[in-house]
């Protein structure tokens, strides 16, 4: 073993000289294309061989760190909590890379039977051979082991060995199709095909997916909460349908929403109105928000503390009046803007709590629920969907907006409520669209780019009302 260390030291010195040449003035800059690709390919081969050594060594570090007597475990003797920590300290890799090395090591290690002292074959002897011959590195090995390990229970040992052998041949470039040596992504694709073949009804794959499914909300940072996770295909499919339904509502035969636009300039303006500078992911975010707010307000969810799931936003009355300060959402450390608080108040309800300087509650109003279901249905009939021209969000997905702000005395009356989608509701103060009520009928004045004449126009997406308007015209 001393010899191996001396051999590797000598190799390292030779490698150090080569690295120094490549990084020197006559190195990569002056190299021809052929030489450049040779450097890349040879360095990768050396890297794969070096990884093979790391994987085998790491595997035995872990094996020796798992003994029954704590004081005798290798990691413990070197002052580390775990084999992973010892591997990280010796190799200087991240915890993630150490985990990969150890996972690869478990797949190829030949352990010793405790009773007989016999050296046992590894779980993947074919891939162990491809690793030893420098044909795969850690990523290629894991690309094979990942899919096959998922079906190991149902596949049985003989089938697993057959897959291992064939995939190792593909890694060496000796596969059935005589293709050149497979790279890691090819191996993953081949191994996935094998896994599906070995687990025909998908029971194991499905079980693994079931265990891995999950959604997590991270901590709020810079005003954003990271969302990550993995959805089962049917859940992703359902979510995609919800997105599609909100973002691309099917156009039915009722025709364009703005029949009353007659001149060319007006038609041009209507075409421009669909201009929407949100990115695709921003649109998906807004559709997600729409779906959540719609479901929360639908009455179909279980109650929380005796009420529908209610997003509580607290704000000081003085701040709302002065327009300066922040609001807070329950369970979120970061403050949110007053604009957000006003928008939430617009389509939700407001409960005024008066307290004295010491914090004692002096009085509470009963919550003021805005717009009854009856009012909502009537407004939906009148507006037919988001009233902003060019927006196709249907009534079912819309919020009700107080044209004259609720917190400034605007009544909760159908004459003061219009339908807006989540996006247009959130941007109504800054987007340039203006809304007013004219004897109970919503009118919109577009931004200059949409309508240079800045004319107020009565709007509706309701087919019933559009037919109404046409009724008096000569045919
Ligand atoms: Zn809209």
Image: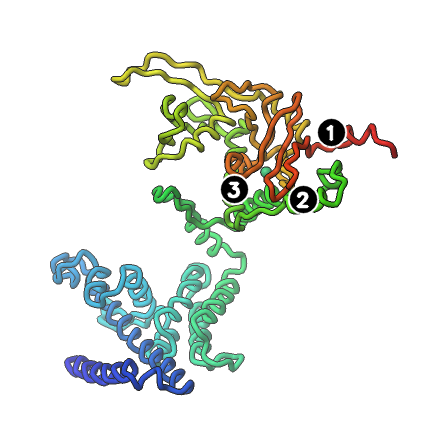
Look at the numbered disc 1 and give the secondary structure of its residue: helix
**Is residue 365 shown left or right of residue 371?**
left
Q: Secondary structure at mark 2?
A: helix
Q: Position of residue 123 (x, y in %)?
A: 35, 68
Query: Tag on residue 465?
Result: 1
Is residue 135 visible to us here? yes
Residue corresponding to mark 3: 286
Left or right: 186 as drawn, with respect to 88: right
Closer mark to the observer between disc 3 and disc 1 = 1
Image quadrant of ligand 1 equals: top right
Label 3 packing within 10 angstroms: few (<14), some (14-19), many (20+): many
Mark 3 or mark 2: which is in front? 2
The answer to which of marks 3 and 2 sits earlier in the sequence is 2
Q: Residues within 10 Å of mark 1 (few under 14, many from 20)?
A: some
Q: Residue at x 42, y 14 (%)?
A: 365
Q: Which label number is shown at residue 269?
A: 2
Considering every residue shown, the one lying at the far top of the view is 362
């Amino acid at each position: 073993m001393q010899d191996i260390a001396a051999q590797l030291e000598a190799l390292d010195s030779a490698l150090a000289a080569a690295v120094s040449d490549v990084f020197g003035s006559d190195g990569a800059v002056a190299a021809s294309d052929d030489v450049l690709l040779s450097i890349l390919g040879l360095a990768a081969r050396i890297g794969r061989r070096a990884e093979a050594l790391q994987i085998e060594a790491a595997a035995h570090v872990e094996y020796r760190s798992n003994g029954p007597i704590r004081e005798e475990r290798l990691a413990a003797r070197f002052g580390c909590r775990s084999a992973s920590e010892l591997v990280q300290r010796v190799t200087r890799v991240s915890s993630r890379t150490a985990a990969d090395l150890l996972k690869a090591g478990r797949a190829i290690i030949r352990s010793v039977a405790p009773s007989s002292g016999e050296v046992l074959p590894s779980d993947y002897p074919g891939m162990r051979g491809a690793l030893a011959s420098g044909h795969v590195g850690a990523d290629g090995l894991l690309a094979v082991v990942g899919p096959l390990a998922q079906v190991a229970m149902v596949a049985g040992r003989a089938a697993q060995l057959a897959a291992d052998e064939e995939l190792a041949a593909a890694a060496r470039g000796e596969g059935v199709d005589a293709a050149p040596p497979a790279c890691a992504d090819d191996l993953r694709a081949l191994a996935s095909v094998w896994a599906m073949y070995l687990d025909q009804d998908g029971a194991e794959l499905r079980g693994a997916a079931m265990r891995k499914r999950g959604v997590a909300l991270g901590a709020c940072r810079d005003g954003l909460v990271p969302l990550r996770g993995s959805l089962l295909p049917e859940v992703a499919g359902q979510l995609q349908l919800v997105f599609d339904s909100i973002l691309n509502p099917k156009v039915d035969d009722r025709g364009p929403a703005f029949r009353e636009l007659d001149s060319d300039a007006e038609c041009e303006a209507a075409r421009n109105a669909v201009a929407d500078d949100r990115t695709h992911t921003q649109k998906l975010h807004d559709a997600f928000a729409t779906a959540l707010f719609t479901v929360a307000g639908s009455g179909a969810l279980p109650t929380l503390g005796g009420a529908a799931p209610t997003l509580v936003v607290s704000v000081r009355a003085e701040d709302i009046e002065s327009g300066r300060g922040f609001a807070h959402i329950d369970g979120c450390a970061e403050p949110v803007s007053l604009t957000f608080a006003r928008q939430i108040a617009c389509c939700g309800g407001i409960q005024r709590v008066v307290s004295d300087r010491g914090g004692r509650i002096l009085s509470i109003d009963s919550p003021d629920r805005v717009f009854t279901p009856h009012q909502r249905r009537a407004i939906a009939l009148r507006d037919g969907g988001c009233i902003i021209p060019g927006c196709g969000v249907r009534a079912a997905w819309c919020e009700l907006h107080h044209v004259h702000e609720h917190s400034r005395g605007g009544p909760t009356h159908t004459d003061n409520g219009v339908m807006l989608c989540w996006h247009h509701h959130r941007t109504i103060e800054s987007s340039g669209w203006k809304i007013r009520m004219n004897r109970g009928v919503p009118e919109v004045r577009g931004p200059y780019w949409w309508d240079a004449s800045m004319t107020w126009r009565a709007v509706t997406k309701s087919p019933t009302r559009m037919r109404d308007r046409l009724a008096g015209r000569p045919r």
